[in-house]
Image (spheres, grey):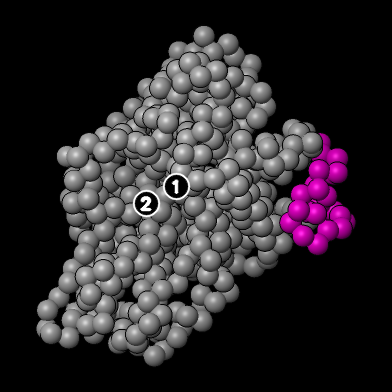
Amino acid sequence: MEECISVFDMLKIGVGPSSSHTLGPWRAAERFLSELQTKNLFDKITRVKVDLYGSLSLTGKGHATDLALMLGLSGQDPEFIPVQDIDGIIKNIKNKNEINLANTIVIPFYFLQDIVFNKNFLPFHANGLTFTGYLNDNTEYTSTFYSIGGGFVVKEERVNTKKKMQIKCAFPFSIQNAEELLQLTISQNKSISEIVYENEKSMRSEENIHHELMRIWHTMLECMYIGCHSEGILPGGLNVRRRAFDMHQGLIGLANYTTPQEWLESIRKTEVKFRQILKWVSCFALAVNEVNAALGRVVTAPTNGSAGVIPAVLMYYLVIENHQAGEKEIKQFLMVAGEIGSIFKKGSTISAAMGGCQAEIGVSSAMAAGALCEVMGGTADQVLMAAEIAMEHHLGMTCDPIGGLVQIPCIERNTMGAIKAINAAELAMETDAKNAKVPLDKVIETMWKTAKDMNSKYKETSEGGLAVAVNMADC
């Protein structure tokens, strides 16, 4: 089956801390409400229960899955909800034992009883959740969804129907793997970003493409800005102190600015020494994922757990590599990153519950490496080589968050993914692509095989690795 995956599918604006465990269940709740309305059942609802399965159950508390479900059932939109309102909405539901379903009707809701954490796995995917709506005629309506990573939500029967129908991609340039993308750049005499742009134009206006790409970037920039200017302890019980604030203070000095854009320009004017480059990149990545861990607004890139890599590498390009770069290069970077991410999604997975952390940090590092390579002047084959190098050195990375929280080791891993992406881009730029030994498609294939071989306890279950080696009570 050919898939059309837009840049805006891979880079989504939402609320942390997890795209698969927070944004996905949130969107599933929205879809459940939509189903009730479509089937004329909404007005008959007297109670709603949600059953969580597999990884959603095992690490759902640490990933705020229960909070996301309550917000989704309340009719809140993760892309636009004022994040400062979240605590008040949740407290109101818990205190009153009721929920304003779709912001329309108030029904009883006991969150300790009506959100059930089942440790068993459903066969279709590791992240399953079933909604049950109880109706006033003593009947029930149930609907099962799967959060497959990156905020994508599917139904098993819908996936099977698509396979049977063999739905074709409507893009002018259908791309299923890296080799097809490379051949298109040759036959069309276009860069990767130009190929992606033509595909996006088949779905939306040029004005809308520009507006949405810049909205994504401004969300990333604001997220870094907030993270660099926020002190304190992250929620969840691990007592993790925010580090981006102190690191940023040591780097920026006494610079004056009042907005994220002024902040960006201020950093550009700062004399950056070699060792400070690593600190700046790490600071940017830390900032994003500290905001993410605190239920802030981030861009899934391709997931929330790996949301810091792409902004950090793009910021590196803007403040270190090219002070003259502007909207053109930002859009180019994001389009290339999105396309590389979509190829990974088609050929493997972007879900840590299916593939471990290689599916999150590894993919984000590959996306960032390829994007950086193109804006630095790399050829299409060098771009794909950069992505391959970045992923090659994340193969086998496990997902083992302590306490099920997207904090340790997740936040630091974003800094490592960003640094590796820059290194991979530099290596690719200095290499004749004709001498490449490992095609990107082979690495993606290997990644998927590795994911299938990986023990389930290392796939976002908090049942292996650091998650059991470190006692949460000792943190």
Query: Which picture quadrant has residue 343?
Result: top left
Question: Disc number at residue 9?
Answer: 1
In the rendered structure, which disc, 2 or 1, sits on the residue that comes first in sequence? 1
Task: Locate residue 196, reporting x and y percent.
Answer: 51, 33
In the image, taking residue 252 as reference, residue 22 lies left or right, namely left
Q: Residue at coordinates 41% horizontally, 41% vertically from top-left? A: 5
Q: Residue furthest bottom?
A: 96
What is the span of residues highlighted in magenta in the rendered image? 250-273
User: Marks 1 and 2: in contact by CB < 8 Å?
Assistant: yes
Depicted 265 relative to depicted 332: above or below: below
Query: Which picture quadrant has residue 334?
Result: top right
**Is the N terminus in the top left, top right, bottom left or bottom right quadrant?**
top left
In the image, taking residue 111 as reference, residue 291 lies left or right, namely right
The type of residue carrying mark 1 is Asp
- Is residue 393 in view from this perspective? no
**Number of marks:** 2
Task: Locate residue 440, reporting x and y percent.
Answer: 43, 23
The type of residue carrying mark 2 is Phe
Q: Residue at coordinates 32% horizontally, 59% vertically from top-left? A: 56
Q: Write down the residue under mark 2.
A: 152
Depicted 235 relative to depicted 174: above or below: below
